[in-house]
Image: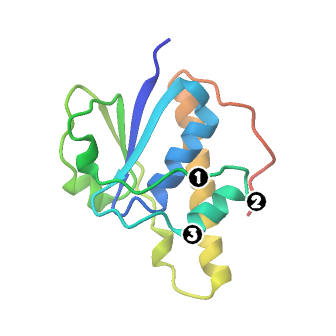
Amino acid sequence: MSKKSVLFVCTGNSVRSQMAEALLRHYGGDQFEVFSAGTTPAGVHRLTKQVLGEIGIDIDSQYSKHIDTFKDKSFDYVIFLCEVAALSCPNFPGNYERINWFIDDPIRVIGNDERRLLAFQWTRNMLKTRILEFIKTNGGTAQTEQSPVIS
């Protein structure tokens, strides 16, 4: 069975697309070739690393990439995590399924550290739910679940 290729796209490639990439790589195992990029990459946010670490996923090797990095690559799925990226992203070669999962950016949450952390955890939990459904819908089998998501 060949791997299905998936690209997650958002604006900064610092939170949502980084989380989605890590979650699909973790739960999808060797069934998917997974990438993420942004229209204006901003570096991986420290809370992104923290909330994924809470569920045992290490993303120290991940980094922000510009969407142009993948302009000549073909994908099976391109999943947009924000409307801005969906509207400004170029087309990719080949025949791919374009999917919109517009999720609010937790970076925009204003408040104390606890409130901001909760926003990042909510985003992680929402993406985990969608990723597990995506794997199931696309004929895959999610790798064994670890402990329940911390919220």
Q: Identify the coloring.
A: rainbow
Image quadrant where one finds the C terminus:
bottom right
In screen coordinates, is 47 left or right of 78? right
Distance from the alpha carbon under mark 3 to that under mark 1: 10 Å
Type of amino acid under label 1: Ile
Q: Which residue is depicted at the point 61% across and 46% down? A: 129
Distance from the alpha carbon under mark 3 to that under mark 2: 17 Å
Q: Nearer the N terminus, badge 3 or badge 1?
A: 3
Between 114 and 68, the one nearer to me in the picture:
68
Q: Mark 2: which secondary structure?
A: loop
Q: Is residue 72 above or below residue 40?
A: above
* Coordinates of residue 121 in the picture (x, y in percent): 64, 64
Whether tag 3 and tag 1 are in contact, CB under 8 A, the answer is no
* Coordinates of residue 90 in the picture (x, y in percent): 18, 47
Name the disc covering residue 59, or none.
Answer: 1
Between 29 and 61, the one nearer to me in the picture:
61
Type of amino acid under label 3: Arg
Q: Mark 1: which secondary structure?
A: loop
Distance from the alpha carbon under mark 1 to that under mark 2: 18 Å
* Coordinates of residue 66 in the picture (x, y in percent): 29, 54
Closer to the eye: label 1 or 2: 1
Closer to the eye: label 3 or 2: 3
Exactly how many numbered labels are in the figure? 3
Dot 2 corresponds to which residue?
150
Q: Which residue is depicted at the point 54% across and 50% down? A: 61
In screen coordinates, is 47 left or right of 12? right
Dot 3 corresponds to which residue?
46
Q: Residue furthest bottom?
A: 112
Q: Residue furthest right?
A: 147
Q: Mark 3: which secondary structure?
A: helix
